[in-house]
Image (cartoon, rainbow, N blue to C red):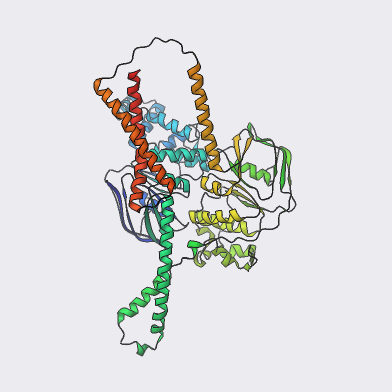
Amino acid sequence: MANLLNIENLTKSYGDRLLFGDITFGVEEGDKIGIVARNGTGKSTLLRILAGDEAADSGKIVYRGGLRIGYLPQEPTFAPGVSVIDAALQADDPIADLVRRYNAALAAGDAAATERIVHEMDEAHAWDYEDRLKQLLTRLGLPDPHESVDHLSGGQRKRLALARTVISEPEFLILDEPTNHLDITTIEWLENYLKRSRATLLMVTHDRYFLDRVCSKIIELDNTEAYMVEGNYDMYLRRRAERIEAMTAELAKVKNTLRREQEWMSRQPQARAGKAKYRIDAFYDLKERSRVNLTEKNVKLDGATSSRIGSKIFEAEGVSKRFGDKVILDDFTYTFARGEKLGIVGENGVGKSTFIKLLQGLVPLDAGKWDVGTTVRFGYYSQDGIQFDENKRVVDAVTEIAEDIAMATGERIAPMQYLQRFLFSPADQRKFIHTLSGGERCRLHLAVTLMRQPNFLILDEPTNDLDIITLGILEEYLADFAGCVIIVSHDRYFLDNIVDHLFVMEGQGVVKDFPGNYSDYREYLDRKARQESAVAATVREAAPQPRRQQARPERMSFKERKEFEALEKEIEALNAEKAALEAFFASGESCPADEFAQKSKRYNEIGDVIDEKEMRWLELSEKEK
């Protein structure tokens, strides 16, 4: 298999802070690699370096010559004032450039230039490019190609950047948090697109279902090093646990040896004057190795104690809200129970965030009322973030709120101890807030939200910028949280682990209460679609078919008949192989990493091969009629 990218001894630091040092790995054609790490350890920086937007301190990056690369940054930018379609055509692609020039010539009324570019368009088969782009924009929720990018929300800008990245069908995709700000429907579309795509993929994402279903390899950045695991996210978790166990045992040995050598080094200098220099050097090497910090690997968030919540939580009575023609809620009535954990899902723009702002009185109602219990104390994690004094250090900002924090265990701890439970090391706590990464700011926001002792948590897109490690810790905390929880999220894994039921906001004020988590809801929708399809097929078969005069289709040749018969056997065998692989993955049976990676890769390949052969089978079957 062809090698597309080699990274050798790559190092990057900011000041005295080393993000990664001397990391080395390769990317082969067809790889689908996910990068995971704690926030602030250099995931996005690594992608920017690979995309050429930032320089490394040292090391070598070698791409295969002529490789077409598509890069989606975490925070995409566009020229101000341009239309959606023009922004999408800014892709670094010769055909996009042709379409841009053609549109410019038409707009300028330059007949000579138009005629010249028409010939170029013909030769490049570029006439369907703009149509495909418009279809993609519509599929991603951007139906008006002439709207100015200045009017787009953050989520719409991300979807536009995604369209710009994939429309030219690059051979190698570099994606930084592609699921951020996307609704679940669009995430599932992107997931299926990437699974079927032949493009090689290197991406950063915190979406664990996405990682599990798309990726064949995982790279973790940890302690300035890069660790690659063959297999999907589930396999990575197993290998990571094994690595941490081995590191813990190794660290214990190092510390035992270090104690003995420390005693030797502490003797009078003359007592060791004749000792070998290598032993002194080995002592300092041991000392360095003993500084590895494994505390965060098994950290469990023991949050601040929550205040007592009474039997009455809140009731919604005839609540209505609209903005012009857009209806958010229409005569909504509901009684919230103690201990309830609710997820809110729906496409972008239906009013999920507005719903929870209405509940807290942050947005006024048009009609109806919320009747909130007197003991309810809201803790609100907003996707808009929280306002901090940017020139304060992290620990000082928390100390201003409370000098000590009462924990659920009954103990009271200092802000420095509390922040360590949110993966802020003592060095991180000394950082100025304006230097924090997006994920670090989110962790600080979460820490401040929980330290105020809420008994009713409202989390609006908490997973957007939190790393996988923090998400796992937060899930454990919420599972044991004694109060009430409302979560607005597009993270299916997060919803599945936390919520008891869903509010499905379908638009125009329609809110349906579904009993179950998101996977239950997805299964319900799939089952419903299959039933409707079966009913429609039955109706079509029962309906009298009008006699139509049509040209008799061409009959199969002898060669085509042989191909047709062979295809039936091949498709049957491929489906059997696919079913066997699915049974293996579902069994949880262990196997060597390289064998597991081969099975994962083969499973992804089979889907594409079956699609191709079934399409050819259908073409030939038309001749059989």
Task: Say left or right for 624 vs 45.
Answer: left
Task: Say left or right for 590 vs 378.
Answer: left
Residue 102 location, quadrant? top left
Task: Say left or right for 316 vs 22.
Answer: right
Q: Is residue 480 visible?
A: yes
Q: Position of residue 128 (x, y in %)?
A: 37, 28
Q: Residue pushed farthest bottom? A: 270
Q: Position of residue 277 (x, y in %)?
A: 30, 81
Query: Residue at position x 65%, y 61% from top?
Result: 305
Q: Nearer the viewer, residue 348 or 50?
A: 348
Q: Position of residue 418 (x, y in %)?
A: 58, 64
Query: Residue at position x 50%, y 26% from top?
Result: 534
Query: Residue at position x 65%, y 48% from top?
Result: 340
Q: Nearer the viewer, residue 94 or 406?
A: 406
Total label count?
0
Q: Position of residue 272 (x, y in %)?
A: 34, 87
